[in-house]
Amino acid sequence: MKKIIVAFWIIFALGKISFAQNDLILHGLNIIPQSTYLNPSFVPQCKVHVGFPTFSSFYLDLGHNGFNASDVLTKAGDSVYLDMDALLHRLKKNNLLFFDVVYEPFSFGFKVKDKHYFNFYVAEKLGARVYYPRDLIEFLYKGNGALLNEKMEIARFSFNFNHYREYAFGYTYLWKSNLYLGGRMKLLFGKSNFHTKELNASLTTESDFFDITAEANLDVRTSGLLTYNDSNQFNARDYLMNKKNFGMGLDFGATYKYNDKLTFAASIVDLGYIRWKTNIQNFTTHNQNATFTFTGFDFSEFASKLLSHDSVNTDSLVRALKDSIINIFKIDSNYNAYTTMLNTKIHLSGFYQLTNHDKVSAILRFWFYDKRIHPTISISYLRRLGNIVNISASYSITNSNYANLGVGLSFKPGFWQIYILTDNILAPFIWNKYATTNSSITLPRNWKYMNVHMGMNLLFGCRPPKDYIPIF
């Protein structure tokens, strides 16, 4: 039982693995050069920075908007079991799972005459997100008898996976002493993609004979998932060095210093696309809105053959069922190139300088994905301890989760900088223990969202003059 529960939690908590790098606490830490990724008009405090080779920046996030372990696990006697009714109650009509990984092996940036800032980085970006309807989980749990004569829609189900390499070139200009204008051009090279352009399906169970009627329209596109060599083995070199899936992206931003205390900023990031051309395999249904009715099979005949030790050709049964579905819906494969768009984000932020060492800030983010707008808001406080340590704390509302307390630390002895940030420090440390006589299970109490960002930089020219007032 313990193994079942742990496996289920891995699937639905860790597997709810946006491509949106949240990293909200970073936007107020201009001592960290990577803060410019949220807004290309942000200019770091130091004149020159070089990302430490192979570990300039590493970012990971994962989360979901469904349930916590404490919501759905119940102890009864000597057993801990998954309360599926509670799980269904906690799920929304449509639910989102996601994860993102961003690895930056190298970056650099430098200022010229305090009016121009140039920067560059290369990053590997990998992410996945799944939308799934509550009806689907209910159907899998209760079976087709739970929704008699009702149409169960799976129209909002989608799965998207993306892996690409990004080369980014940024430039920022100080105009009229109080306005920074910035932009960034990105060259994108896709490695692999799984994209459900359309997956509309429904299941209806007839009440008299429990026949299941299915309707489906399918358009699934994939690239880079079939990279093999002559020995039919995955060819890692060809996969990683592939430059034929080309795309471009743009970021824009502006930062306006209203007075010595108050600064406003706005940005649009990840406007762009990738054109997928290599190792394509797509699947589509050409018979739109076709239906397939499964009436079952003669189980008594099946059972009698088993009892009499007669051979039962289950392969032919499955093959016949598969062939029928393919013929009815006319599922076809093709190798046509296709285009996917980046998930655009808009950031609106404000900064208030309490003292030369203290700052408060707020950021409102709108993430556009799957024809929806996903808003997030965060407020943070930054304290500068001399020229060595910067600490920050934040509170965020994101992904239908209100329990996100973040912390950030930048430590810079000399020209060496080490930083680590998270928007939800409590998630990894608050756990519930479900103990029985013979065993116990310990799981995160609130793990709807978690991220971590860490890395190292070499910084030069960071000491500000005594009368220095930051622009943000």
Image (cartoon, grey):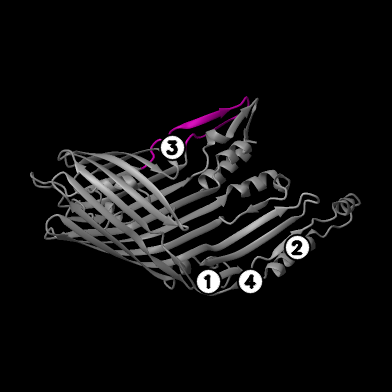
| Residue visible at 20% across and 42% down in the picture | 352
Give whichever of discs 2 and 4 has the lower sequence position.
4
In the image, what residue type sits under mark 3? Pro
Q: Nearer the viewer, residue 109 or 179?
A: 179
Q: Which of the two residues, 418 or 289, is positioned nearer the viewer here?
A: 289
Left or right, residue 1 beside residue 344: right
Q: Is residue 240 visible?
A: no
Q: Amino acid at mark 1?
A: Asn
**Residue 319 position within the rendered picture, expressed as x and y whole percent measured from the top left:** 75, 64
Check disc 1 and report its element: helix, strand or loop. loop
Q: Earlier in the sequence, mark 3 or mark 4?
A: 4
* Depicted 299 relative to depicted 274: above or below: above
Residue 40 placement: quadrant:
bottom left
Residue pointed to by mark 2: 321
Question: Which residue is labeled 3 in the image?
Answer: 428
Marks 3 and 1, Cα distance to the nearest angstrom?
39 Å
Q: Are marks 3 and 1 in contact (CB under 8 Å)?
A: no
Residue bearing mark 4: 286
Instruction: Examine the image and state in which quarter residue 43 appears.
Output: bottom left
- Circle 1 residue: 279
> Magenta span covers which residues?
423-446
Q: Tell me whether circle 2 and circle 1 mark residues in contact (CB < 8 Å).
A: no
Q: Secondary structure at mark 4?
A: loop
Going from N to C along the chain, the mark reached first, 3 or 2, is: 2
